[in-house]
C-alpha cells in the first residue's frame, strides 16, 4: 500500500470514528452499534 492510499484510509477511519463518536447512545443503538464497537465498525468501513 502506498503512502497516499494509507493516509486516505487513515483519514476515512478517523472521520468515521469522529462521526460515530458524536452520535448519542440512542442513535448508535438504532444503528445496532454499541459505543465500545465504534473503532471496530470504523475499521470494517475502510476495508
Image (cartoon, helix red, strand yellow):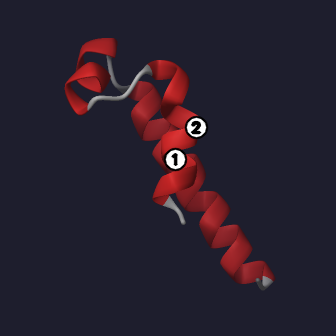
Vertical placement of residue 15 versus 7, above or below: above
Q: Which residue is located at x 32 percent, y 17 percent?
A: 24
**Residue 10 x/y as whole percent:** 66, 60
At label 1, counting other C-alpha atoms closer than 10 Å, the crowd grade (few under 14, some 14-19, many 20 or more) is: some
Is 22 located above or below residue 5 in the figure? above
Determine whether 40 is above or below 29 in the image.
below
* Left-right relation of 4 to 20: right
Name the residue tied to disc 1. Answer: 42
Image quarter for residue 7? Answer: bottom right
Q: Secondary structure at mark 2?
A: helix
Res. 31 image quadrant: top left
- Residue carrying label 2: 39
**Residue drawn at (46%, 28%) of the image:** 21
Q: Are marks 2 and 1 in contact (CB under 8 Å)?
A: yes
Q: Residue at x 62, y 67 (%)?
A: 9
Residue 14 picture location, percent across and down: 59, 48
Query: What kind of element bears circle 1?
Result: helix
Amino acid at each position: 500500500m502506498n503512502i497516499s492510499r494509507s493516509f486516505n484510509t487513515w483519514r476515512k477511519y478517523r472521520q468515521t470514528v469522529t462521526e460515530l463518536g458524536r452520535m448519542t447512545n440512542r442513535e448508535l443503538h438504532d444503528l445496532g452499534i454499541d459505543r465500545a464497537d465504534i473503532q471496530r465498525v470504523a475499521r470494517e468501513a475502510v476495508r
